[in-house]
Amino acid sequence: MSEPMTADEITRYVVARAIWAPSVHNTQPWRFTTDGGPQLSLHADTGRRLTVADPDGREMMISCGAALFSVRLALRSLGYIPETSVLPDPDQPTLVALVSWRERAAADEFERRLSSHLLSRRSHRGAFDPEPLPPGTLATLRAAAEREGAALRVVADDGHRAALAAAVQAAEHQLRCDGERVRELTRWTPAPGSAYRDGVPATAYPAWPEHTEPDFPGRDFARGHGWGLPPLSLATSHRAAGVAALLTTAADRPADWVHAGQALQRILLTASVGGAAAALHSQPAELPLLREFIRTQLSDGAYPHLVLRIGLVTQVAVSVRRDPEDVLFRAGP
Ligand SMILES: Cc1cc2nc3c(=O)[nH]c(=O)nc-3n(C[C@H](O)[C@H](O)[C@H](O)COP(=O)(O)O)c2cc1C
């Protein structure tokens, strides 16, 4: 029989999976600390916060929340029951969570399948195939959000869907006209062939915008350089926007942001298990007037964090991450 893993080995296993969580512009705004025992601290790395786009750190906390869900799931895959305390110390607002593991229970089949997508899930950018999602997918994704204290609101009505697309268009237009924001995006969009292990690489987005009806424009990662992936096929006429949805929380405090992030990662992994992918649009949530428009007109007063488009697609995006050793530190005197 093989030796049980040590706490150090478990920590390294978990962090090696958590780093593949999604984060805004792939900023990877997290640090982990361990004292060598069966517990792990997750900290927000405020040096990686988007100072212009994310002044309150909401997107940073959502990103950390996604990493936290991955920590919990990776522990489950090893047969441990994670005990999680979110924002445990009011005097340390960047200590996102403490996670410990002592009790054991074997992972169930779904947890095993979910965790097998921790390394391979990717954000999609552009249009989707025209085929509908398998029946039951949306109900499963809504339940996934609810389990983590957030909501996934499918925007099915044609008028609302058009209004949501218009909000993404207006936001994207405004962001492209704002020099400070463009400079910030430049920092996180390295040129093809770059050795950077963070930011959005040119292998992760299409070289030509894939327009859909209604149109949900993507971020301008290439900024006129012509970077990006060539189209898989030239048959662009039947490409779809996918199912549009909003990730929301009832309140808008840092703890809600962490919950939104955990819900996001549970949704994305659940979709991935079901053979679906999601495109993420946070452009309108970064602009207070548009965020308020969505909150009051499209989400019944709940606070929107992300527009998600969910659909079927052959994915080819390749992303990057820093090494686990760059984000895992030994705590101590
Ligand atoms: C809070 C948040 C906001 C995001 N906003 C966008 C966005 O507006 N457009 C986009 O293409 N991707 C967005 N993403 C996805 C990230 O760019 C993506 O997670 C990151 O580049 C890592 O790539 P991966 O998800 O394929 O591993 C967002 C992710 C998070 C967590």
Image (cartoon, rainbow, N blue to C red):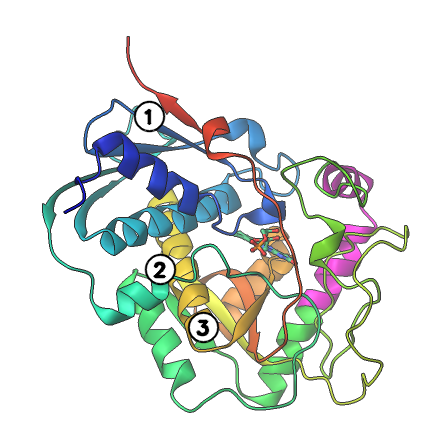
- How many neighbours does mark 2 have within 10 angstroms: few (below 14), some (14-19), or many (20 or more)? many
User: Is residue 97 visible to the viewer in this orientation of the structure?
Assistant: no
Task: Answer with mark 1 or mark 2, whichever residue precedes in sequence.
Answer: 1
Which three-letter amino acid code belongs to the residue tagged 2? Ser
Residue at disc 3, CB closer than 8 Å to ligand 1: no
Q: Tell me if residue 37 comes above or below residue 131 in the rendering.
A: above
Which of these two is toward me, 98 or 51?
98
The dominant secondary structure in magenta is helix
Q: Nearer the viewer, mark 1 or mark 2?
A: 2
Q: How far apart are marks 3 and 2 (CA)?
A: 12 Å
Q: Tell me if residue 113 comes above or below residue 3 in the rendering.
A: below
Which of these two is toward me, 233 or 98?
233
Give yes or no for residue 102 being in the magenta stretch: no
Q: Which span of residues is magenta-colored?
A: 168-186
Instruction: State the image coordinates of residue 173 (x, y, percent, origin top left).
Output: 79, 59
Which three-letter amino acid code belongs to the residue tagged 1? Gln
Give yes or no for residue 181 being in the magenta stretch: yes
Task: Answer with mark 3 or mark 1, whichever residue precedes in sequence.
Answer: 1
Q: Tell me if residue 218 comes above or below residue 178 in the rendering.
A: below
Query: Which quadrant contains ligand 1?
Result: bottom right
Q: Tell me if residue 134 comes above or below residue 276 in the rendering.
A: below
Judging by the rendered image, the residue that carries numbered circle 1 is 92
Q: In which quarter of the image is the C terminus?
A: top left
Q: Residue 139 — which label? A: none
Judging by the rendered image, the residue that carries numbered circle 2 is 115
Q: Residue 271 — which label? A: 3
Q: Distance between the residues labelled 1 and 2?
A: 30 Å
Which three-letter amino acid code belongs to the residue tagged 3? Ala
